[in-house]
Image (spheres, grey):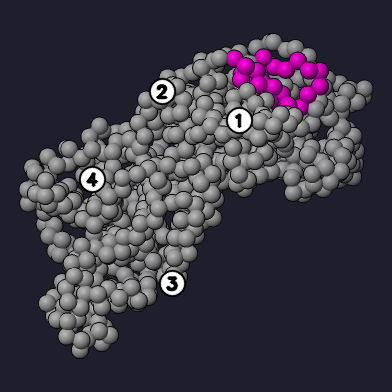
Amino acid sequence: MPQSKTCDARFLKTIEQRLLWLSHWMIHNANNIRPKVDGIKIGGHQASSASMVSIMTALYFSALKPEDRVAVKPHASPIFHAMQYLMGNQTREKMENFRGFGGAQSYPSRTKDIDDVDFSTGSVGLGVAITSFASLVQDYIQAKSWGADQPLGRMVALVGDAELDEGNVYETLQEGWKNDLRNCWWIIDYNRQSLDGIVREGLFERVEKIFEAFGWDVVRVKYGALQQEAFQEPGGEKLRAWIDRCSNQEYSALTFMGGAVWRKRLLDDLGDQGDVTALLDRRDDKALAALMENLGGNCVQTMAETFAAIDHDRPTCFLCYTIKGWGTPIAGHKDNHGGLMNSTQMAQWQAHMGVPQGQEWEPLATVEAPEALKTFLSTVPFFAKGPRRYHDDKLAVPALPAPTEGEISTQMAFGKILDGLSKGDSDLAARIVTTSPDVTGTTNLGPWVNRRKLFARKAQSDAFIDHKIPSTAKWVFAPEGQHIELGIAEMNLFLLLGAAGLSHSLFGKRLIPIGTLYDPFVQRGLDALNYACYQDARFLVVGTPSGVTLAPEGGAHQSVGTPLIGMAQDGLAAFEPAYADELAVILEWAFDYLQRDGEGDPDERTWLRDETGGSVYLRLSTNPITQPGKRVNEAFRQGAIDGAYWLREPGPNCEVVIAYQGAVAPEAVKAAGLLAEGRRDIGVLAVTSADRLNAGWTAAQRARSRGNAAAVSHVEHLLAPLPSHCHLITVIDGHPATLSWLGAVQGHRTIPLGVEHFGQTGTIGDLYHHHGIDAASIVEKVQGLTAGRKIKAGIHASL
């Protein structure tokens, strides 16, 4: 057994050095060898990669199992690609094209890289936090009868120390504590250098207390094997004490300057003490530099032993002391975050690494016993089963009847439709998991939760039920529960939706995640929402209540720009239905759309993602409006899905079309009725999704520019019959730019109405009138068209 461990340690050291070289050569090739197309720096973070190489080698080639999942810190991407290249999961072509079009990505990407990426990374802190929620999702799945066979893996984040400045990390810690987080490792690359400087002294002592307060084990990995051996020598304790006293800036500077400077400084501070001087004299300058740079996180042997010592499932934070740029000529320099080795430095370093000219891309160059290493690599548990992308069968979507009330809001209709699902026993209902940041009841998830319970790893009683105190909220926590309650942190909501929305791929068990939040607070979680969509996670997010329609709550609780967010966010199909039957049709479509095979980027011929699927955003309202009655025709159903349909068909001599989206429907209908007394053939266009209308229109234009003259979008079909003199009045309880583009489709003059400024408290009528989106304002704008034409005619006559 000892011989085997020694053998493994030797292999790990060899792998570490190969990954260090391949990652740095890939970056050097991109910046200094590959032909330059423009003057933009390519970059690649050599120093940030070097500080992680020992940690990642020990983790992937010694500690991990196939069921474990890892979020790699963004700036360690080159090490990740080099590792996958070594294992045959990445191509030389993409390595040579690192940070180029179609090449290995700057930061690991599930959708754009071919290697086995578990979690995309990019915006710092998000890759860290999602591992906590992935662990929660894993526990949720295993607690269910259909997921009990799911093997438990560790959800691991490789963390840059500067990422701990991100507030969402601490929001996540709190949520993890509340949900009894298990099987989660955060491995911190504590190189003490960020983009702008050196990390503040003593910072992690504070951070460490925070981790411990939330129930995490904290493991400090400060000294490597060489240092630990030196500490056993006479004078070693004095050397350890000096290392502990040395400031971050000083340690970094001494590292950059090298062995001779290390010797002088240590002799100045610790010399003439006999045993310390002898300890230093036993090492030449090169060996002394290696000793002082052998911090725990830069020692693959120490890291492997540290990981192997963890024999529990408690969340664990590893604080790994490292040197930024370790093992390279730029180690320790404060400017090395974005710095690169120049050609001279690289040539010298290549000689130092022993890589022959012409073999720079050879995975096993410099390896003395390549066959033995290949045998070892073939037995590494994490890679033994190949790529770990799983799949799960699609779930049949049952019919979703619309509520039959004569007057109802879309928010209330959403709750009723979901409650209808909760009463059934469909496979789809069993896989739905709902979540909300402390607004479960006020976003109409209450009936669903009452029937389907809240999730907890262990059952918890409700004191109100125990004491028979009447309450509409029957909050029962149990392993079979299907609602995960969150605190007031929208970043956590979208991170949980992102993790749950990848469950079919990460764990082989499909979930249908539904998250609700107040629509104005979508903006509080935008970074995490974008991150979830970038990974192609599949979820339904319901923003409700929305707009100035939430009148008494004031401007801070009224959303203006969210319809534009829905249009702009890739991977998210945004809808804003006005009526309950529209919502039922859209939800039925959405539950299928979430499950469509979206591996990789969508093909441009299906840019709407109708084949590849995506996530869905519903912008709903608390304003109850009169319903139009039962509608069963196919034009209505398909129009609601494609983005619009004629609520009132325009006549052949139509002068005005009112196009609306969302809860302002009654104002548009009322205005059309008033205008019909003096104008002919007025049309009313019910827009359910400006997002899908616009995406279809731009896709059709692209197709026509490439030779497909038959490509015509849905909105072009709708507006084509309108005469050229027809005017469009668009209205929405949101930013008017959402619909203002409709005039460009066929060249009709357009007057966009909407909300451009913060609202205030008042009644719905007060605010609709204040912002000019009520029926009277619509009529006023149409009447202004006549006056405008007369003025224009007068100007032409005078000329």
Q: Is residue 502 above or below residue 165?
A: above
- Above or below residue 228? Residue 33 is above
For residue 201, the mark is 3
Mark 4 or 1, nearer chain start: 4
In front: mark 3 or mark 1?
1
Upstream in the sequence, badge 3 or badge 1? 3
Looking at the image, do the residues carrying marks 3 and 1 touch, with CB atoms under 8 Å apart?
A: no
Crowding at label 1, few (<14), some or many (≥20) Cα neighbours within 10 Å? many
Q: Earlier in the sequence, mark 1 or mark 2?
A: 2
Q: Is residue 111 magenta?
A: no
Total residue callouts: 4
Q: Residue at x 84, y 46 (%)?
A: 761
x and y, in percent, of residue 451 in the image: 63, 23
- Label number found at residue 61: 4
In the image: residue 431, left or right of residue 279 = right
Q: Identify whether 710 is placed above or below 161.
A: above
Q: Height in image: 335 above or below 181? A: below
The residue wearing badge 2 is 392
- Mark yes or no: residue 792 visible: no
| 460, 56: nearer the viewer | 460
Residue 585 picture location, percent across and down: 64, 19
Q: Amino acid at mark 4?
A: Phe
- Amino acid tagged 2: Asp
